[in-house]
Amino acid sequence: MTKATNTTPGYGRTVWHDISDLYHQVLDLFYVKQDRDKALGPALRLLRLLDKHDPNAEALLGMSGRWLVAELDGDIAEAVRWREREIAALRDQIAKGLLETGAFTADEFSDRLDLLASNYLDLKRYDDALAALAESEAFCKGHGIPFDGKEIRADVKRAMRRKRRPAKAS
């Protein structure tokens, strides 16, 4: 990872602040406001900054940003690749005490597993989706937080039932 440089001298603001701001702007535009077209410009700027300042995708925010841009582009397989990589890195960080530092919460990890399950569902990788949700639920139980992936699990099970039904002859 290359060293971030200050973009606003004297204020201690680094390029990572800009990356974080763009990431949250794209999240808001794409998921909350559901305006894909408006999200495209900030997403492109986000990707350019990530390519310049995290070319090897070593930063968690870099992995999250790349997942988000892939999802925005409709490339779910690429989104899954980035989310799997991010979750693997988070597992390592959690094992080293990341949750105890307050830099990351149990909810955030569980949410990422639920989002991965949703992406697996989109790719019809039902067993992988259920495995991610099982991990999320166990993690939530172990940390005393509510499990939010129940609807996704129900969607996966519905999709699995539809897949098993024989097609009706006309």
Image (spheres, rainbow, N blue to C red):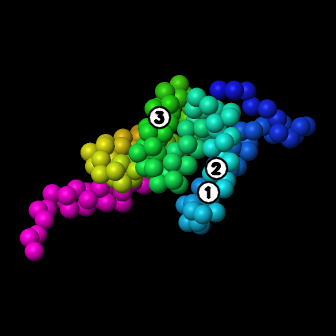
Residue 14 lies in the magenta stretch: no
Name the residue tied to disc 3.
85
Q: Residues within 10 Å of mark 2 (few under 14, many from 20)?
A: some
Which span is picked out in magenta? 146-170
Relative to 156, does residue 78 appear above or below in the rendering?
Answer: above
Residue at the far bottom in the pictured view: 170
Label 3 secondary element: helix
The residue located at (19%, 58%) in the rendering is: 163
Label 2 secondary element: helix
Displayed quadrant of residue 127: top left
Q: How many marks do you count on the picture?
A: 3
The residue located at (64%, 38%) in the rendering is: 50
Q: Give the residue type that dot 1 points to.
A: Leu
Residue 20: image location, x then y, percent: 68, 45
Residue 69: image location, x then y, percent: 55, 49
Residue at the far right in the pictured view: 10
- Gap between marks 3 and 2 measured at Cα: 21 Å
Residue 102 located left or right of residue 127: right
Name the residue tied to disc 2.
44
* Mark 3 or 2, closer to the camera: 2
The residue located at (50%, 31%) in the rendering is: 89
In the picture, which quadrant includes the C terminus? bottom left
Name the residue tied to disc 1.
40
Residue 3 located left or right of residue 72: right
Residue 119: image location, x then y, percent: 40, 50
Relative to 110, does residue 73 appear above or below in the rendering?
Answer: below
